[in-house]
Amino acid sequence: MAYRVGVDVGGSFTDFAVFNDKTGRLSTLKVFSRPDAPGEEILLALDTLKSRDGIDPAEIVYFTHGTTVGVNTVIQRNGHEIALFTTKNFEDILDVARLKIPQIHNLYSVRPAPLISRERVFGINERMHASGEVMIEPDGADVARALASAIAAGCKGIVLSFLHSYRNPCNELAVKAIIEKLAPGLPVISSAQTWPIIREFERTITSVISGYVQPRVAHYLNRFETVLRDRDVTCPLLITKTNGGVMGIDQARAECVQMILSGTASGVIGAGYLARASGFDRIMSLDIGGTSADVAVIIDGEAQYGVGELIGDFQIHVPSVSVSSVGQGGGSVAWLDSLGMLQVGPESAGSTPGPACYGRGGTKPTITDAVVASNLIGHTPLGYGAVTVDRGASREALAPIAEKLGISIEALAGTIIDISVSGMYAEVSALVSRFAIDPREFHLFAFGGAGAMLACFLAKELDMKGVVVPPTPGVVSALGGLIADLKNDFIRTIYRDVTDAQIEALVPVLDQLEQAGNDWLKAQGYDGPGDVKLSADMRYIGQSFEVETPISGEWLRLGTASAVTSAFHVEHERLYGHADKKAAVQMINLRLVISGATPKPALVEIAVAAGSVAPKLQIDGWFSGRSVPTAIYMRQDLAYGHRLNGPAIIAQDDTTTVVPPDFDIFVDRYGNLVITKSEA
């Protein structure tokens, strides 16, 4: 046998998707995550798969892994102390930033403290001209003094970001060589090697985030690799990337920023693949885990991408799957603020101790506890038997807040659900505006441990087309890592006007990018032809920021500036509703994305229903402040063509789907639950 494995490590659960290359069978598993002992959850899952399904780790030929360790390090600000070496007299770059306040309508809004405090920023006497000409070479003694000061301050790594190094990296590389000679083993991050873009702050903050998470990510990946080798997994190990692809583990250790959104990107890729294969061309993915709810726009199976995605309080400027996150996960804690107002999140109970209903020592009330107290989940074991719900513990956790507010536990539980949904609504509204879409034309594709639990409530508020719940929603992120293609981004800042002569002069740059892309694919062990996509960041002369525009390499080779400018006008009009076709256009960056396809499991059609399906049991569930008779069905009992009416609960090993009154359920040929509002 030969097995392909995808793993997603979340805040509460670790998910496994295992594909048998010979039989086409897909096995899934959920176990509790172990942030206190990373790697132990991998050992447990591998042992369980071997005993339960006979899957021998030695027969694993492909292993991908997505994790939130990088993004959590930034959000929780628990990375190692690092120093920034920048051009002398530019030491305030992180404090000055873009002079923007986080909330433009809040006069009391305060910008977050930088990840590197001012006393750990050191100026190096070097200077590069904007043309790439070296004006001042760095001095070894100057670098040594700065290094000694950084080490004395307790810094465990160095980030280098010099003026105009995107144009010529030689000063940064010279300083990096000096540091590596003076302090072998000390991590050194070069901004020109991390992401060589023109704007100094954007390049610097991206490199700082990479350096900030590097020690913790490297330690995690080392542990992860050791655990797998101890279980005789000898295949190359791949890590899912922020851009929705995968890369080798060595590159992940060296370029941590490329995997900062590893876990969330995996879920979006998995959702896009399943939606397209099932015939849903316009969806918004809803991935709710233990800590957050993540939403992305997916059209024709393709996720929307962008730069400047928010990681905690800061933006990264590498290409990323565009995901909006809000702290409304299943483990998000409900609490009263100083004014006695009910709040939900962003604090999460995680997996240890977890929601009170898990019976693992948690005492704080969470969104999951609210759903349990509403009698909507917990009638069957959760998490492949890992969780047996304790409804009494949920009610006990909610009781103190209910007493202070003078309401019943059921009323409090309903209010907690409403608050969590309103938080998601606000985040989705911003996403809708950003991509200029109409949610009424989209299905909400729900997955993650709690996605199907809350999806119908959110879809109702957004007036969406419906909700789609795939057959194994709890492990879609693991599946996304399993089917993600090898993929890497390359960029070159060229900063020139778009004319025939200037465009033709870009051919050598294009050749260099294509060569770099093909070399990267070969280094990943891929021997087939790569799929290349080319784009350019362009703007009208006088504009401050650019629009990424898909272009053709043939236009550059033929020196056809008119085709390039026409493509920009079309994209500008699509985004902003107007285009000035007489205005001169500038090209700032040339981008190339290369990918190598990986095998994808085909979706299997399920059996056709032979008749109606009977519920496993009937309970009284609480919806909108009232108790309503509710049927509970087992997912494995449903077949193609079954139609059910809400209120209903669909129970399965990896999640629970909650369907309120006034919704209908149809089971399609691939086993998806297609949930729509009842016709009046």
Image (cartoon, rainbow, N blue to C red):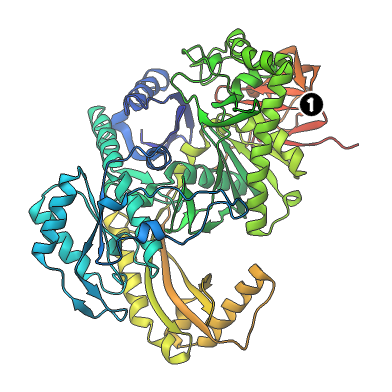
- Picture quadrant of residue 660: top right
Residue 568 seen in the current view:
yes
Residue 280 seen in the current view:
no
Q: What type is the residue that disc 1 sits on?
A: Gly
Mark 1 falls on what kind of element?
A: loop
Q: Residue at x 38, y 70 (%)?
A: 198
Q: Position of residue 298 (x, y in %)?
A: 60, 52
Quarter of the image that includes the C terminus: top right
The residue that disc 1 covers is 646
Quarter of the image that includes the N terminus: top left
Position of 645 compared to 148: left or right? right
Position of 570 compared to 475: left or right? right
Q: Residue furthest front?
A: 108
Q: Residue furthest top?
A: 392
Q: Residue at x 49, y 24 (%)?
A: 349
81 over 473 or under it: above or below: below
Report the front residue among 272 and 639: 272
Q: Residues within 10 Å of mark 1 (few under 14, many from 20)?
A: many
Disc tally is: 1
133 over 446 or under it: above or below: below
Q: Residue furthest right?
A: 680
Q: Position of residue 130 (x, y in %)?
A: 32, 79
Q: Residue at x 62, y 29 (%)?
A: 343
Q: Residue at x 55, y 36 (%)?
A: 327
- Picture quadrant of residue 139: bottom left
Report the front residue among 378 and 88: 88
409 over 283 or under it: above or below: above
Q: Position of residue 72 (x, y in %)?
A: 41, 38
Q: Position of residue 383 (x, y in %)?
A: 52, 21
